Amino acid sequence: MKIGIVCYPTFGGSGVVATELGKALAKNGHQVHFITYQQPPRLDFFNENVFYHEVNIPSYPLFQYPPYESALASEMVNVVMNENVDLLHVHYAIPHASAAYMAKMILRSWGKCVPVVTTLHGTDITLVGKDASYEPVVTFSINESDGVTSVSEDLRKDTYRHFKINREIEVIPNFIDLTRFKRQQKDHFKTAICPNGEKLIVHTSNFRRVKRIDDAVMTFYHVRQQMPARLLLVGDGPERNRIQQLCRELGIHDDVRFLGKLDAVEEILSVADLFLMPSENESFGLAALEALACEVPLITSNAGGLPELNLQGVTGFLSNVGDVDDMVKNALYILNDDHLPTFKANALARAKEFELSKILPLYEQHYERVIEQA
Ligand code: GMT
């Protein structure tokens, strides 16, 4: 197949899933055309089946807001016409699904039929999409997509609950490439970060409010009172300064390291003992799956799709959003040396259920069905 992929070229989950999916499709012999406003960070290798088309967004003094959606739709039209693309797969509903609809209509007026698959990733539904400013467009463009997938059962239900959707949504979960995400021998890292054998706790995110990083820090604060521990915070975003200030106020700043946006997060996860994801909302939790693959057990909230990934008492524990006391109690249980090895083994076993080779065929079959019905 020749597939056009549209995504946000960011470190965020939807961009990562879209890029890794495109790379895997290309390795499987499909021709993949990425259409984005910037090279996606993980599109960092050469493959003869991967093509990159940058969306040019001219800015004129007349526009207070450059019309990105129109530029994107035009680029989709160009790519479909010039490259003979069979299908467009857009990740994140806003504004990709509506831009794809516009492209589809333009192409149809020229006698060219190209089906559109939309993948819902989370905040496009749970936060942003529900806003009255976007809701009619989100509802319309999901209903006008030829195929719709969501990354968890919870997100699927949420989409039906909040929008008037009249088409089937197939759940295709996030996936993991276990050849990249695996526990590696990085003992020198561990010694450098935890010179006295402290337990290493990790959180990675884009530092948005929805991630509730305060809860991660407070959990660490209380755990550290019971056992020697260090916290690594990977990523960056709007909450960073506030969280740094919180660590200073709590007097734990020396035991917390802010690592910023790291590409090789698997190297840090390789030396971690526990991963924290206390999110307010989390449609799937790709970062938590990456931790599991590196044999790191989880303390998460029970928000969104997290119970579909983190198995209570098996791969870690889930608590109500904001229940830091429960998170502390569970973290101490996992970090006990008698319990840790079992949780680590369970983590890897769980990650294997989301291995790329198991999930990729679900997308391929979805595409085939959509193309057949178009
Ligand atoms: O987690 C984020 O804030 C980034 C966000 C995105 O839209 O890129 O990630 C979402 O999509 C990921 C890939 O499907 C999911 O694993 C994340 O759980 C989801 N984030 C939220 O629902 C908050």
Image (tube, rainbow, N blue to C red):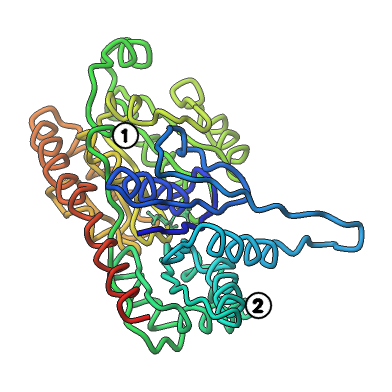
Disc 2 on helix, strand or loop? loop
- Quarter of the picture holding the N terminus: bottom left
Classify residue 351 by image quadrant: top left
Can you give x and y, in whole percent of width and height, for residue 240 in the image? 58, 39
In this picture, is 169 found above or below 211?
below
- The residue closer to the viewer here, 359 or 156, is 359
Nearer-N-terminus badge (1/2): 2
Task: Tell me the residue at 65%/77% (across/down).
Answer: 133
Please name the amino acid that badge 2 sits on: Ser
Can you give x and y, in whole percent of width and height, for residue 200 in the image? 31, 26
Task: Tell me the residue at 61%/45% (across/down).
Answer: 38
Classify residue 195 by image quadrant: top left
Density class for disc 2 (Cα within 10 Å; few <14, some 14-19, many ≥20) is few
Q: How many marks?
A: 2
Disc 1 on helix, strand or loop? helix
In this picture, is 70 found above or below 342?
below
Left or right of 269 in this view: 108: right
Report the residue marked by disc 2. 133
Asked if marks 1 and 2 touch (Cβ < 8 Å), the reply is: no
Q: Is mark 2 within 8 Å of ligand 1?
A: no
Report the residue marked by disc 1. 223
Please name the amino acid that badge 1 sits on: Val
- The residue closer to the viewer here, 232 or 345, is 345
